[in-house]
Image: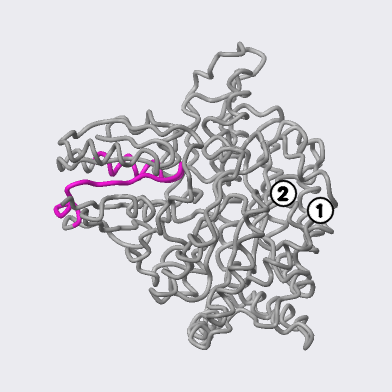
């Protein structure tokens, strides 16, 4: 028997994805639990005793450390500083620690002081680690072959380890991988371009487990592109719809997908019938030449505004990602991006700076051109969010101009009137299914408390938002009353997004002042050889509370 302490490292709480205002309204500590860690827990021997501590929602105590025979942790790039601190703490206490996850897989050199590294997808390598542990071996590196995991053999995650009250929503994963080839993306490097899907029975078993444990409401399909394997998805959705109908629609689903979702009317209607209500889409740029240069050709083959409103008409609202800092961006990029966001009426837009992630085509190209900064993949304790920690390379345009453009976009799209104008347009276009958000009476009753918190927050702390919200609600006429829930949801999200945008703008202004004062000296690309690295250390523009991505 082995006592395993599973620790999910902390993110910077000022991340775009922390959704702090929304968490406050719903009484949660963090948006989502660590699906990867509880999947690892399910892969471990049943005789091993597992405890989970999520440092984003609870304290890691001395008692936890004392109890553990083995500590297992790891995560994404923005969690890197906390993972390193956990390694240091484990070593000081003499506790063996095992590190895995995408950041360790991409940048294992940062975690060399750990006892064990488990790199790549865990399913095909965890047995070797367990065998070594049982044999008394206390150091080792275990690396899985890329893209070889058969996800149809992945067990149901250990949802029983979660305290659902800590989170806005749990997650399930249907597939891994994405068929596209975006230059800046690391998903295809980690999981491949041939999406591997679980069976229908696996997903229904996972949902059964969530249902048995008492969860109701929002569930996120965490796939990086749910529609990457359309054939498999279309086999799942009728089963998913039937499962929902039998239980009076206890869950409402969100996910991430590519823009070609809008091309498939049958798929959209199937997702609507299964109760999908939200999708995140990577739009990145409104500029065709930029999309082609970034190898995101799928976004150039359709009219963007028409595609977004097609998705709205299926009762699914859109969140989107945008990136500033591409080599092909022109001086007009800020106006073009803000106009695109306005035309598509997408309220929640994750606008970030281009970041060279480890082991991507972009990073390899920049390195070959001598434009990649040394230590580009190191995350400082208050860095990591692409909103402020991007541009870890020499851009082709002046850095100051890029920061000014970014600041201009944020100021325009997160100004309250502009934000709620987009909410209003989207609400009018949203053709939500008649069953609404909370068909189950227990869920409906539970949602009354967040509504009360939202009203109190508007009356007590954010009175300037009351009139924009009321104007939005007035557009939800008798023909589209279900859009009221959408307006209230967007209002809760704005409690975070509005303050977060202000925070990022303040950071950008500090960086611009530093450039103007001569405190930031970016080396000239003309003076660098193709394989030469920049010798200077980057100025640390961070402050306590600096943003970090999740």
445 part of magenta stretch: no
Q: Is residue 35 above or below residue 141?
A: below
Residue 395: horizontal and vertical position, in percent? 66, 29
Residue 21: horizontal and vertical position, in percent? 51, 68
User: How many numbered circles does the render carry?
Assistant: 2
Q: Is residue 151 above or below residue 63?
A: above
78 part of magenta stretch: yes
Residue 491: horizontal and vertical position, in percent? 62, 72
Residue at x-position 52% and y-position 69%? 22
Magenta span main SS? helix
Is 61 positioned to the left or the right of 509 in the image? left
Q: Which residues are magenta?
A: 64-88
Residue at x-position 56% and y-position 32%? 392
Which is more N-terminal, label 2 or label 1?
Answer: 2
The residue tagged 1 is 304
Q: Is residue 206 above or below residue 242?
A: above
The residue tagged 2 is 283
Residue at x-position 18% and y-position 43%? 95
537 or 485, which is in the foreground? 485
| Alpha carbon distance from label 1 to label 2 | 9 Å
Residue 159 position by quadrant: bottom left
């Amino acid at each position: 028997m082995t006592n395993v302490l599973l620790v999910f490292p902390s993110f910077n709480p000022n991340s775009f994805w922390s959704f702090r205002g929304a968490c406050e309204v719903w009484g949660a500590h963090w948006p989502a639990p660590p699906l990867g860690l509880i999947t690892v827990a399910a892969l471990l021997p049943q005789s091993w005793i597992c405890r989970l501590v999520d440092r984003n929602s609870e304290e890691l105590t001395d008692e936890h450390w004392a109890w553990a025979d083995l500590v297992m942790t790891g995560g994404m790039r923005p969690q890197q500083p906390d993972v390193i601190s956990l390694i240091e703490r484990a070593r000081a206490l003499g506790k063996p620690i095992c590190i895995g996850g995408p950041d360790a897989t991409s940048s294992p050199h940062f975690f060399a002081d750990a006892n064990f590294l488990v790199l790549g997808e865990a399913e095909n390598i965890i047995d070797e680690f367990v065998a070594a542990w049982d044999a008394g071996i206390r150091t080792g590196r275990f690396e899985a072959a890329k893209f070889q995991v058969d996800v149809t053999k992945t067990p149901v995650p250990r949802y029983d380890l979660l305290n659902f009250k800590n989170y806005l929503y749990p997650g399930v994963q249907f597939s891994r991988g994405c068929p596209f080839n975006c230059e800046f993306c690391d998903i295809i490097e980690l999981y491949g371009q041939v999406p591997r899907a679980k069976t229908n029975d696996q997903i229904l078993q996972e949902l059964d487990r969530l249902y048995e444990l008492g969860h109701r409401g929002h569930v996120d399909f965490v796939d990086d592109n749910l529609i990457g394997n359309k054939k498999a998805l279309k086999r799942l959705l009728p089963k998913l719809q039937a499962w929902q109908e039998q239980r009076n629609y206890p869950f409402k689903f969100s996910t991430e997908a590519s823009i070609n979702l809008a091309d498939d009317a049958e798929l959209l209607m199937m997702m609507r019938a299964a109760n999908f209500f939200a999708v995140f889409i990577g739009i990145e740029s409104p500029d065709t030449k930029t999309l082609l240069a970034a190898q995101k050709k799928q976004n150039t083959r359709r009219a963007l505004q028409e595609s977004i409103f097609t998705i709205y008409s299926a009762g699914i609202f859109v969140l989107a990602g945008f990136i500033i800092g591409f080599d092909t961006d022109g001086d007009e990029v800020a106006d073009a991006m803000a106009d695109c966001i306005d035309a598509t009426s997408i309220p929640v837009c994750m606008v970030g700076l281009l970041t060279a992630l480890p082991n991507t085509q972009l990073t390899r190209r920049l390195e070959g051109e001598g434009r990649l900064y040394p230590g580009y993949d190191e995350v400082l304790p208050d860095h990591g969010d692409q909103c402020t920690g991007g541009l870890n390379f020499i851009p082709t345009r002046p850095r100051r101009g890029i920061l000014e453009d970014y600041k201009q976009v944020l100021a325009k799209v997160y100004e309250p009137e502009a934000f709620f104008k987009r909410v209003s347009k989207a609400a009018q276009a949203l053709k939500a299914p008649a069953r609404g958000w909370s068909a189950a009476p227990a869920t409906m009753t539970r949602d009354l408390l967040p509504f009360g918190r939202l009203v109190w927050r508007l009356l007590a702390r954010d009175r300037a938002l009351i009139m924009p919200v009321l104007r939005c609600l007035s557009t939800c006429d008798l023909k589209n009353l279900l859009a009221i829930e959408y307006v209230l949801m967007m209002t809760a999200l704005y409690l975070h997004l509005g303050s977060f945008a202000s925070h990022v703008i303040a950071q950008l202004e500090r960086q611009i002042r530093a450039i103007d004062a001569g405190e930031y000296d970016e080396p000239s690309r003309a003076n660098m050889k193709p394989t030469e690295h920049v010798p200077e250390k980057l100025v640390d523009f961070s402050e306590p509370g600096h943003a970090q991505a999740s």
